[in-house]
Image: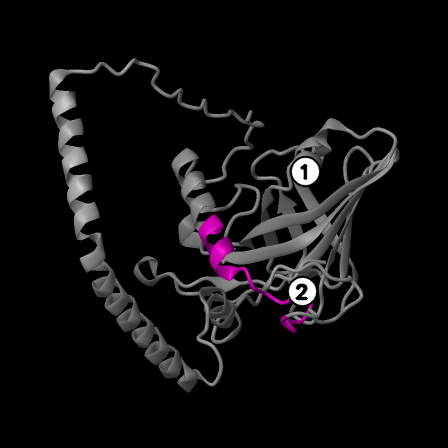
């Protein structure tokens, strides 16, 4: 397991990071994922304001690297003059160097005194000053809004505040689904407000698995991030990002649909719809990655409610 705060790898059985002491599965990447979410939303809005139609799979294209210029440099009389001027300045600096050394020493001494004073001021924090990641983590856990099915949340585009979602509150420890091709999907999420997950797809020939951390946030109805089959009058829409840190396939050969996840642990963005009446959760492969085979929508059934 990889600590989401200091980045060190440690045993999955450990409940706390041996270096920084952070609890296993605790959140520490909010600032990073908030930026990813903002970029993803902007991309969706530019391409298609609403999810009224199912997308076709996209083909990734690589940008060509710009080739450096290979034009020869021509020497001119004007260029010779510039060279002579540079040489003259260099000679002048060499002559002045002995007198500049004491000035430089005084300058560095002054900077050192300022740094020492700054360190003394930081002592008022009681330890070290909080870094940006710690502030992100605190803002996520302290005073943040959390999603409750059926609640109404005010949308303020001028002062946008995310509503975070704990998947365990919706599906418990483990949820499953059977895809149209017979593949069995299982999704486990951490309890105790953690954000770790494990996803398995058993297609009969082998088992694809990945684990990492997730990020989930409520989509306001005003953002129009819904499919026509899941209207905001009946369903709440959630943006769900699965960031795989480990992927694998237990089998001889694997289907093409696992290629992207096995070769590149990229973020997997899904939409999740929560039925306000039943609480059932349905996932949508909104970017048509094909991870769920021919299925675009996957209805989850909770197996264990913690």
Q: Locate residue 166 relative to residue 201 in the image: left or right.
A: left
The image quadrant that residue 169 belongs to is bottom right
List x then y, in percent, for residue 59.
55, 25
The numbered disc on residue 25 is: 2
- Residue 278 visible (yes or no): no
Tell me which residue sits at (67%, 49%) in the image. 245
The numbered disc on residue 261 is: 1
User: The residue tagged with tag 2: helix, strand or loop?
Assistant: loop
What crowding class fits label 1: few (fewer than 14 Cα within 10 Å), some (14-19), or many (20 or more)? many
Question: Can you say whether 123 is above or below 268 in the image?
Answer: below
Q: Locate residue 183 relative to residue 197 in the image: left or right.
A: right
Q: 194 or 107: nearer the eye?
A: 107
Is there CB contact under 8 Å for labels 2 and 1?
no
- Residue 263 visible (yes or no): yes
Q: 111 or 14: nearer the eye?
A: 111
List x then y, in percent, for residue 251.
87, 35
Question: Which quadrant holds the N terminus?
Answer: bottom right
Q: How is the image coloured?
A: one colour
The image quadrant that residue 78 belongs to is top left
Cα–Cα gap, marks 2 and 1: 21 Å
User: The residue tagged with tag 1: helix, strand or loop?
Assistant: helix
Q: 91 or 123: nearer the eye?
A: 91
Q: Locate residue 57 relative to residue 103 in the image: left or right.
A: right
What crowding class fits label 2: few (fewer than 14 Cα within 10 Å), some (14-19), or many (20 or more)? many
Please tell me whether residue 33 belongs to the stretch shown in magenta: yes
The image quadrant that residue 117 belongs to is bottom left
Tell me which residue sits at (59%, 60%) in the image. 276
Question: Which quadrant holds the C terminus?
Answer: bottom right
List x then y, in percent, for residue 136.
47, 66
What is the magenta range?
20-37
């Amino acid at each position: 397991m990889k600590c989401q705060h200091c980045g060190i790898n440690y045993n999955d059985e450990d409940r706390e990071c041996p270096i920084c002491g952070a609890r296993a599965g605790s959140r520490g990447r909010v600032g990073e994922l908030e930026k990813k979410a903002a970029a993803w939303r902007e991309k969706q809005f530019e391409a298609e304001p609403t999810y009224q139609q199912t997308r076709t799979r996209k083909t990734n294209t690589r940008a060509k690297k710009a080739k450096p210029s290979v034009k020869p440099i021509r020497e001119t009389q004007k260029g010779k003059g510039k060279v002579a001027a540079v040489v003259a300045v260099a000679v002048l600096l060499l002559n002045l160097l002995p007198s500049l050394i004491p000035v430089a020493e005084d300058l560095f001494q002054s900077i050192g005194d300022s740094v020492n004073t700054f360190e003394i001021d930081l002592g008022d924090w009681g330890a070290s000053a909080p870094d940006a990641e710690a502030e992100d983590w605190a803002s996520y856990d302290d005073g943040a809004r959390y999603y409750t099915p059926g609640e109404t949340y005010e949308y303020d585009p001028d002062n946008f505040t995310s509503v975070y979602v704990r998947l365990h509150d919706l599906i418990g420890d483990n949820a499953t689904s059977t895809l149209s091709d017979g593949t069995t999907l299982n999704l486990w999420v951490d309890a105790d407000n953690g954000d770790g997950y494990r996803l398995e797809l058993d297609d009969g020939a082998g088992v694809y698995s990945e684990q990492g951390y997730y990020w989930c946030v409520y989509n306001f109805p005003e953002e129009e991030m819904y499919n026509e089959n899941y209207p905001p009058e009946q369903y709440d829409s959630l943006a769900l990002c699965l960031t795989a840190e480990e992927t694998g396939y237990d089998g001889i050969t694997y289907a093409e649909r696992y290629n992207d996840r096995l070769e590149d642990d990229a973020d997997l963005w899904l939409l999740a719809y929560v039925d306000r009446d039943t609480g059932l959760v349905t996932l949508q492969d909104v970017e048509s990655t094909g991870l769920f085979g021919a299925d675009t929508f996957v209805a989850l059934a909770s197996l264990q409610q913690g």
